[in-house]
Amino acid sequence: MRTGLTLLLVVLFAVFGAVFGALNAETISVDLYVRSVSLPKGAALLAALMLGWLSGGCLVWFARGRRARRRAKAAAAAAPGSPAAPDEPVVSGGA
């Protein structure tokens, strides 16, 4: 069920992108600071959308990984037998 829904959404977005690109076929010039590129308007807009989607996804992925590393470090520090565990009583000498 979920795979079918995902496939349906991918196909719908692909069709939407193809129709959008066909309806916006005029060529525009995009200045990239170092050079200028002539692209169809639809392709330029879809490329900007994909670039934003990918950069946002990478930022979220890196932030989640950073949070997971921080939690793992805190869990390791609080683990019993760890030298950095703050709740562990200090016993000097014998029993």
Image: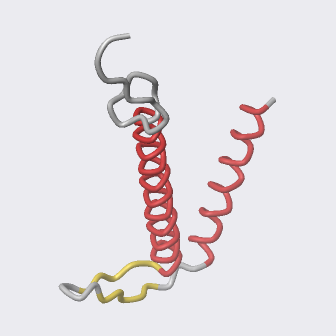
- Extreme-left residue of the structure: 34
> Relative to 45, does residue 5 appear above or below in the rendering?
above
Pick the quarter of the image with the N terminus.
top right
Q: As rendered, which of 46 and 28 lies closer to the eye? A: 46
| Horizontal relation, residue 73 to residue 10: left or right | left
> Relative to 88, does residue 8 appear above or below in the rendering?
below
Colour approach in the figure: secondary structure
Q: What is the x, y in percent for residue 72?
A: 44, 37
Residue at figure coordinates x 42%, y 88% from the top left: 28
Residue at figure coordinates x 56%, y 71% from the top left: 21
Q: Image quarter for residue 77?
A: top left
Q: What is the x, y in percent for residue 90?
A: 38, 29
- Extreme-top residue of the structure: 95
Q: Image quarter for residue 32?
A: bottom left
Q: What is the x, y in percent for residue 62?
A: 42, 53
Q: How many marks?
A: 0
| Horizontal relation, residue 55 to residue 22: left or right | left
> Relative to 53, does residue 37 appear above or below in the rendering?
below
Q: What is the x, y in percent for residue 41?
A: 49, 81
Residue at figure coordinates x 46%, y 34% from the top left: 78
Q: As rendered, which of 12 and 26 lies closer to the eye? A: 12
> Relative to 87, does residue 31 appear above or below in the rendering?
below
Residue at figure coordinates x 38%, y 10% from the top left: 95
